[in-house]
Amino acid sequence: QRHPETYEHMRPELVGNCTRVLISDLSGRSNILAKAEEFNINLDSKDPVTLEILDNIKEMENRGYQFEGAEASFELLMKKALGSHKKFFTVLGFRVIDEKRGEEQKPIAEATIMVKVGGKVEHTAAEGNGPVNALDNAIRKALEKFYPKLKEVKLLDYKVRVLPAGQGTASSTRVLIESGDKHARWGTVGVSDNIIDASYQALIDSIDYKLHKSEE
């Protein structure tokens, strides 16, 4: 474990700040262990899972993922590696339609989704202010009857970055979403060559994170 006093000229708490540990493909075991402690996850430096998590970070960041500002996605990644991640629901499929019915009309976005919770399947649709908002509304509409606490969750911020294409490959899109409830705010990330799919990944992580926190 690193000792902050060796590279910080003063304690951040003295001026109202705090030390933040950032996660990237350059992270070492000490950063992973610091994050595990922050998340109240038991992880030993000698545990092979620590190296597995590091390898996962490098592989995902090579594909365009970035966990700075998306620590909820990183916490879920750690839980999956440790086998402590709970599967609350399964998405069986979704469709998003963005339609404009006339020159003077505003576009209408509608999303339909099918989810499975336990042995029950829920198929529903919702409209929204754009395809991402429609998808967010549809996902939560389908799941709120099983998990009422999702009604507390709000989408607070949405950021998109088009990533440069590699040699012989198409460009990808990274989506960062900030969500929150009356207790906290959290960030999630998704990456795909399709902006709707990248948004879907980040939205699912956001809901997944909320459900895990609701059980802690």
Image (cartoon, rainbow, N blue to C red):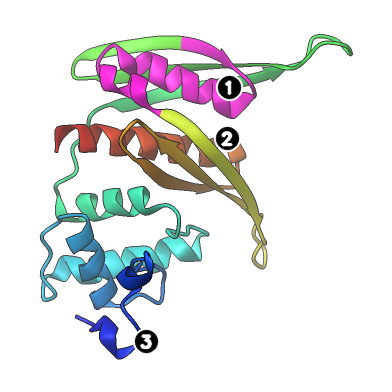
Label 3 environment density (alpha carbons within 10 Å; few <14, some 14–19, many ≥20): few
Secondary element at image label 3: loop
Q: Quadrant of residue 41?
A: bottom left
Label 2 environment density (alpha carbons within 10 Å; few <14, some 14–19, many ≥20): some
Q: Earlier in the sequence, mark 3 or mark 2?
A: 3
Residue 130 sits inside the magenta stretch: yes
Q: Are marks 3 and 2 in contact (CB under 8 Å)?
A: no
The residue wearing badge 3 is 9
Secondary structure that dominates the magenta span:
helix
With 164 as the anchor, is 105 left or right in this view?
A: right
Residues 69 and 134: in front is 69
The residue wearing badge 1 is 96
Q: Over which residues does the magenta segment extend? A: 125-153
Residues 82 and 33: in front is 33
129 lies above or below 11: above
Looking at numbered disc 3 in the image, what kind of residue is underneath it?
Answer: His
Question: Residue 196's mark?
Answer: 2
Q: x and y percent of residue 4 in the render?
A: 28, 81
Residue furthest to the bottom: 6
Label 1 environment density (alpha carbons within 10 Å; few <14, some 14–19, many ≥20): many
Q: x and y percent of residue 181 in the render?
A: 36, 31
Secondary element at image label 2: helix
Q: Are marks 2 and 1 in contact (CB under 8 Å)?
A: yes
Which quarter shows the C terminus?
A: top left
